[in-house]
Amino acid sequence: MPAVSLEFAVAGFVMAAIVIAAAGIRMADIADRLADRTGLGEAVVGGLLLGMSTSLSGLVTSITAAVDGSVSLAVSNAVGGIAAQTVFLVVADIVYREINLEHAAADEKHMLQAAVLLLMLSLPLVAYLAPAYAIWGIHPVTMIMVGLYAFGANAAFRLQRNPMWQPSVTPYTAKDEPAAEAQKESLQALSLTFAGLAVILALAGFVIARTGIQIASEFGISQTVVGALLTAVATSLPELVTTIAAVRQGALQLAVGGIVGGNVFDVLFLAVSDAFYRDGPLYTAMAQRDALMIISAILITGVLLLGLIMRDRRGIGIEGYAILIVYASVVALQIGLG
């Protein structure tokens, strides 16, 4: 994609963000119907299918940045997306006025995914601090992260088929009951529509990446700040839109699963970026401020996991305020670093 004027870059960035938002609204509805039609349930479809598909634009952004040698943009886009998407869950909590969203959407698979996310986020820090090492140009941590993701996905399917325990049911716990008319819908038509929307998101992500890099260059903004605050938020718009849409249509497990599962998939951005970055292991090329972004994502995920376990009944809950404070603090720190 050739360089264009700053005005065209900004316009392209805004238009791509609008496309991402529009496609995300439609995707939430299709995902809910797929959950009913396949019988997999909202938590599994949200955590795996929806979370992966809405993250495609961010994946393309990180890959593009890695190919261009923009390590900080590749890393901060991935990890900044995790932080931003968790904040979006707090926004959805505000929209859902009845009770704390983590309480209403209680599901053991959400906690499983959050635990897997914490494990995966810790690995890039290990690689960053350890001596540089690669096998065929790929760091061993990359392969471990992919293995952890596969383990988490398999465990989620097993829990759906044979749950070992279930959260206590209260008057506010949402029930994931398939709609009777779901079996009348064409699985092929739903799947093709969903796949088409996913392709649109991926293409929009490519535009976001290229224009984001050019905007950063024009204004002299650090790639970490651009990745964490600009491309990460823009490519995370599908998560915001689908989460709000899912909450409004009562698909609460789909909403929470889409965020947590999308965050787990976002860590794979680092693994894929490592494969595309050809100047050595991606993790050892990270800057200190990139590592700080990963630490902030670990903190935010830990707070979210506490909220999923404690199931506060009040509004956005203590965990919601804590997530907002951590996110605001890391944003201020990154801006302060320049």
Image (tube, grey):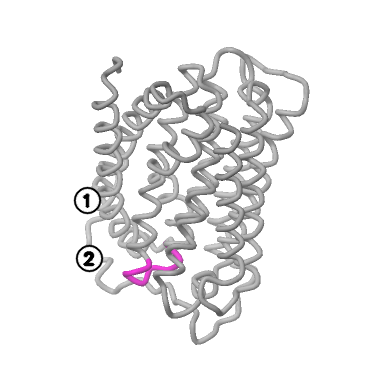
The secondary structure that dominates the magenta segment is helix
Q: Position of residue 292 (x, y in %)?
A: 65, 38
Report the magenta residues as a range. Answer: 247-254
* Helix, strand or loop for disc 2: helix
Please name the residue that numbered disc 1 is placed on.
Answer: 189
Q: Nearer the viewer, residue 27 or 158?
A: 27
> Label 2 is placed on what type of residue?
Lys
Placement of 66 over or under 325, stated as above or below: above
Q: Position of residue 42 (x, y in %)?
A: 42, 63
Q: Is residue 180 left or right of residue 108?
A: left
Residue 206: quarter of image: top left
Q: Nearer the viewer, residue 259 or 169?
A: 259
Q: Residue, x 31% and y 72% (percent of image)?
A: 179
Q: Is residue 283 magenta?
A: no
Residue 149: quarter of image: top right
Q: Residue 41, can we see it?
A: no
Q: Is residue 62 left or right of residue 151?
A: left
> Label 1 is placed on what type of residue?
Ala
Please name the residue that numbered disc 2 is placed on.
Answer: 184
Q: Is residue 248 magenta?
A: yes
Alpha carbon of mark 2 to alpha carbon of mark 1: how far?
Answer: 12 Å
Q: Earlier in the sequence, mark 2 or mark 1?
A: 2
For residue 174, the mark is: none
Q: Residue, x 59% and y 36% (percent of image)?
A: 146
